[in-house]
Amino acid sequence: MAASSPAETALVILYYLYPALVFIYFFFASLVSACTVHSSGKDERKKECPSRRLTLVFYLLCILTYTAQLLLLAARAVLSQSWPTEDHIIIGHLACILAFGIQLSRCLDTDEGPFYPFIGSWLLGLSFDIAITVLSAVLGLFSPFDVFSILASVSISIRCLSFISLTILFTVGFSAKLTSDEEQEPLLPKITTTSPDSPTSQESGYGSTLQAEEEEEEETPEYSWERREREAKEAMKKRLEEGGNWFEYAKGFKILFPYVWPVGNVGLQLRAAAVCLCLFASNALHLLIPRQTGIIMDSLNGSGNSNPWISVLVFAALRLAASESGIELVRQWLWVPVKYYSHDALTRAAYSHMMHLSADFHDSKSSSDMMMAIYGGSAVSNVIENVLLYAVPMLIDMGVAIVYLSITFGPYEGLITVATGVFFLLIASRLVANSKAASRNRVNALYEEHYVRQSGFLGWQTVSAFNQIGYEDNRHANAVTNRWLREQQYVLGWYISIGFQTLVLTSGLLASAFLAVYRIRAGHATPGQFAMLLMYWAQLTSPLQFFAKLGKNVSDDFIDAERLLDIMRTQPSVENQKGARPLKFVAGEVEFERVSFSYDKKKGIIKDVSFHVPAGQTVAFVGATGAGKSTLIKLLDRFYDVGDGRICIDGQDIRDVDLFSLRDRIGVVPQNPILFDDTIMNNVRYGRITATDEEVFEACQAACIHDKIKGFTHGYKTRVGERGVKLSGGELQRIAIARAMLKKPDIVLLDEATSAVDTDTEQQIQISFKRLCQGRTTFIVAHRLSTIMNADRIIVVENGEILEQGNHDELIVAGGRYADLWSKQVFVRTKEEDADASAGQAGFVNDLSSEQTRTELSKVNKPTSATNEQPKSSEARASEEDAPVTQDCKQEGTRLNPVAATFTPRRLAKMRKFMETGTSEASTSSTTQDGLINVSSQTSRQWSDEVADQDEKTLKTTVVTGRP
């Protein structure tokens, strides 16, 4: 109808504003609700959604009333045999059906509050309905005697009552359980494996089938990428709860702003501003190109006034400007330096920050986690690029296109375009959400395939040794088949999703085409404008597909960026204090004063440890694994700070000195040296980057490795492989020693540096150690006690406390824990005795020479008699060996195994051959002067030096190696 008065004009405006304001309010209110999802009234959020059945009934009543009013208009048009002139009423009702249909879909998916987006929409609808009804009555559009007016009034009344009922229902919180919800309740209580007293055992749950599925899901292994994603989501949820909303959450990324935006770089800032101008130019071109296409078509059929040749040239210029060789090329030329500035700055800042973090961080993070966190820097750039460079321009393009098409083809075209876009986004978002499971299964199958393949390659020797190649082949075949099945499911789902999206777009295009043809036939549009319409619809597909995935992409990028943000917010636990000065090294005197330490602030690892080390002395820490020996080394090198007490070097608390100057004075040879995948020359030079080749050669000569390196094919240019895998254990240790020697440290830390080498190699390494430690304060952690015999002090550590300390001789004489360890390490036992006596004990190796063994065991053996025996000549000892031992002779005490086998001299063994018929057999017992062999007359078995070849070999091996 034609508006001829202000009241009629106001009525038309109300019909158009009605659905627009309802949709806009619901959209932005839902956006705010999502952004404040964790803080906007926790009590309100805990409210359950009222009965879906009642909600569905009232919503359907609202939608049906709009439909009824449209049917009334159609019936009146049929009776009057003319198209209704009330376009604003038709558009308004159709748009309201669309707006409230979207709300219904959203409401059915909502289980918890807040509900103010819905309540506000209903109140708006109620207000507009009342205003439109009153204004229509004032204009005389409602007649009490007109059937159509009466039915329309009834429809409006039902709709208003539905709005009021929904508002009361959601405001008061009246809730009635749905039948579908009741059907989900279990008929039988959930069977649990918990104890009857457990609270969870009394709870009802789902049936056994669902429970079995849940248990099966719980047993599914979690891959590394799933763990990282789960941890990032948990961190995001925690920060959202702390911040209260997404705006506060996003503000947490402000620490990354200096690396994303080129602060201080005016040139890059000007480039970013020019990119914005290019975006606006692209928006204009996207509007002008379809319009110019219509102008060309009109000029060709004679309905236009322009010259077709000029129109084509203008079109070509516009297409060239919008192509990859025009504005887009300029935009990329301007944007690429800005984009890669952020990538470069974030990557360098993240790596530098991680390298400056303390040992507690690196001990708790794997290298893959840290590398994946660095990749999170690109996720931050992706969010900015997707939102500012793609989402905003596309949104502008769509808005301009809708307005222009509405002006050209009428408001119906605008409604068709909006409805198509809304349906497309709804369907696409649901399909994307439903594809998450298929996508996750696909990625899991891919990881499983790579894991099986990699484990087969890495464990080839084990696979071949146990003859399991066929088994691994079957595992790999199953993994590959499963992967491709999951891949097919995902790809088919993706094609189905594309099919539905295309169907929606095609339906919208057909509706627009029919409308355009109708307008052209009616003389309200030209054929050229029809071509323009087709081009606009072709441009509409890409933005809609982008917006359908935008939410998921931004969420994934935030999850990736969360890992980086978490690390960038981490502060080092060990850092320089304000005003820290360089270490003033005098002589290397070290003192631990009542030092206590705990890794987790709960279980004490070091407990009130105190000792003093004069300059230049060598101190060895001995004890069981986990006693705290290596922790003491780490505390001295300040990888961790002490919890209580202090550590001083030359009277200076190491927490008060510069960390760089402290570690510059300390050289470390770790238990498992890490070499880089580089040449031997570069690995040794890592101890002092400025060292010359000659200094590297001297360090390697001092470490007894120079000749070995020269024997390699490429000499010092030989690459050692990742972590030095191409070198033997001894070569690895000696290169680490050479690296420490090249540093020329004042304090040396040796953490179990010979744990995995043979005795000959160890002797060579010990020579290198002597050169390295000469004149330097040295701390050694060792399990092979033979390597620390000559230490100035040996400290026995047990459960984080000092049990005893002293030099080797003092601790042996004291007969404490160290003497016990020493006797176990150098004592030789038979197979049977070793199996019985050493069960559950740590294995020790006798790496001493036979002469050292005799000497050291003589210190351990304590005679039970107080009488000091005088030295005897060799003849006297020989006569004692030959003489029989009487029963009343008192046996000397010994620390050796009391059930050791009896040794029978060769000549006595021969005499038995002639005395087999005798009534008795001479009993012999002899004890050597040095206490190595103790022979008792009360023996359970005897052995002689006349044994079979195999037995002789076994005994010889036992004596030499200390193991059967």
Image (tube, helix red, strand yellow):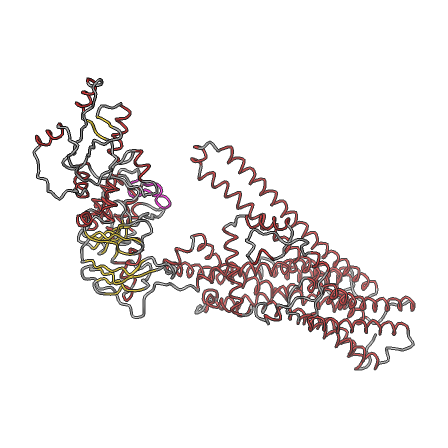
Percent from the top left, x then y, of residue 586? 18, 62
Specify the quadrant that holds the C terminus.
top left
Relative to 273, is 179 on the left or the right? right
Number of callouts in the render? 0
Depth check: give the residue in front, 511 or 855: 855
Relative to 110, is 216 on the left or the right? left
Percent from the top left, x then y, of residue 27? 66, 68
Above or below for 608 versus 816: below
Percent from the top left, x then y, of residue 350? 43, 60
Q: Is 721 within the magenta? A: yes
Q: Is 192 within the magenta? A: no
Please identify the quarter of the rendering in which residue 92 is found.
Answer: bottom right
Depth check: give the residue in front, 864 or 162: 864
Percent from the top left, x then y, of residue 198? 55, 57
Specify the segment rendered in magenta.
Answer: 714-727
Above or below for 85 versus 211: below
Residue 697 visible in this rendered orientation of the protein:
no
Depth check: give the residue in front, 218 or 920: 920
Above or below for 911 versus 900: above
Specify the quadrant that holds the N terminus.
bottom right
Q: Name the residue at 77% across, 57% down.
A: 510
Residue 859 visible in this rendered orientation of the protein:
yes
